[in-house]
Amino acid sequence: MFKLMQIGIAVAVLLLSGCGGSSSDSNPPDGGEPPVSNKLETVLSGDYTVEYIRQDGSAQIAGTTAGVYWRADTSADWQLRSPTTTAVTGIIVLSEGHYLMATEPTSGDASEPYLLFRSQDNGATWEPITHNFGREFNTRIFNLAYDHRTDQVYAVGNAAVAVASPAVEDWQLVTGSWDAFAAGLHLLLVDDVNQSVWFGGQGPIENGYFGRYDQTTENITEWHDLLPRPSTYVDGLIHPLDTSTVILGGEGGIVLSTDYGETWSTPMGDVNYRFYRDIVSTDAGILYTAGYDKLSAEQPLIIECSIDNGQTWLKHDFSHETSRGGVRSLMLVSDGDRELLYLGLRDNGIKAIALNDLDC
């Protein structure tokens, strides 16, 4: 009888230890990547930051802190197609296979001129461009935008908005100055419908501001301190279904106007100094955005969506799927019968999630 009791106790101990083992195996080791569910897909792997994602027909372009990557379509392999391995600070598609790109100086010295390159063969080869952006002050180039209506290229620097022909050799100031002291402009949106250009960033005292250049009258209108300092403006959207609605994102939240700048609201008004960058819209008008914290690459992945033109936003937390969830760029992509949201991440390449997995 005593021997049978010993056997029973031993079996019970083994069963209990087995249950405990399978539970602990589901957790990652300390410092490891959390388990990835089927919802989040890897599109481009790497420990670089993806600042820009562009579409050229079926081809895709990724401007990163380690150069530019290109692939022919969603099923093709990515190729590094870059004249330098320094950070891409702006990239635009002029026409099929015809790209312009700005990068940091190869020396890493920010006092040297930023570089401009042109490719007319899908990025297979690049031609350096001699240009006068910044004049003798070598102002940094923080973003590029192409106006298809006027066939002009816009760029922003420390405190300058400038315009050039597609040759991008001779730049003329639209507003600001080449030698101003400021943290820099990043927001740059061309509005073909209303014939204006939106720009914005941060001034010399950590003050966020943005402006609108009317291409018809050449008037400049500016707005200051809609978000608490420190703040800046990084990117945004002219709503494709309601072109009076302007949504701009940056450090501290999102600002919204439904009357093209006559009045502004802050649906996300002071969000723990989180940066909101790209805002994208589906054909049905559903908006998506995401953000990042600047202190550490280890941060949550939170995607937000809106079905009321940006008035309210619903959060989706995917922090359990990746430990590096800071989003620097977004793009909507059709892949067969699926609609995907591409997420350009800080130090984590590109991930994607199906819109069907985002309940808005």
Image: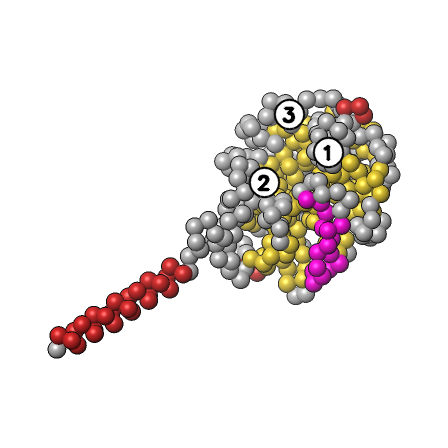
Amino acid type for the residue under numbered disc 2 = Tyr
Query: How far across and how far down the image is residue 225, in percent?
Result: 59, 27
Secondary structure beneath label 2: strand
Examine the rendering and report whether any part of residue 67 can be seen: yes
Q: Which residue is mark 3?
A: 203
Classify the position of the C terminus by image quarter.
Answer: bottom right
State the separation of the CA atoms marked 3 and 2.
18 Å
2 or 1: mark nearer the eye: 1
Query: How far across and how far down the image is residue 200, in percent?
Result: 67, 32
Question: Are the two marked residues, 3 and 2, in contact with CB atoms closer than 8 angstroms?
Answer: no
Which residue is more in the foreground, 124 or 305? 124
Question: Are the two marked residues, 2 and 1, in contact with CB atoms closer than 8 angstroms?
Answer: no
Examine the rendering and report whether any part of residue 284 can be seen: no
Q: Which residue is mark 2?
A: 276
Which quadrant of the figure has residue 340?
bottom right
State the separation of the CA atoms marked 3 and 1.
27 Å
| 94 sits to left or right of 29 | right
Q: Is residue 69 magenta?
A: yes
Q: Is residue 255 magenta?
A: no
Write the start and end of the magenta stretch as one range: 66-81
| 157 sits to left or right of 46 | right
Numbered circle sitting on residue 107? 1
Q: How many marks?
A: 3
Secondary structure beneath label 1: loop
Q: Residue 49, relative to residue 205: is it above or below? A: below
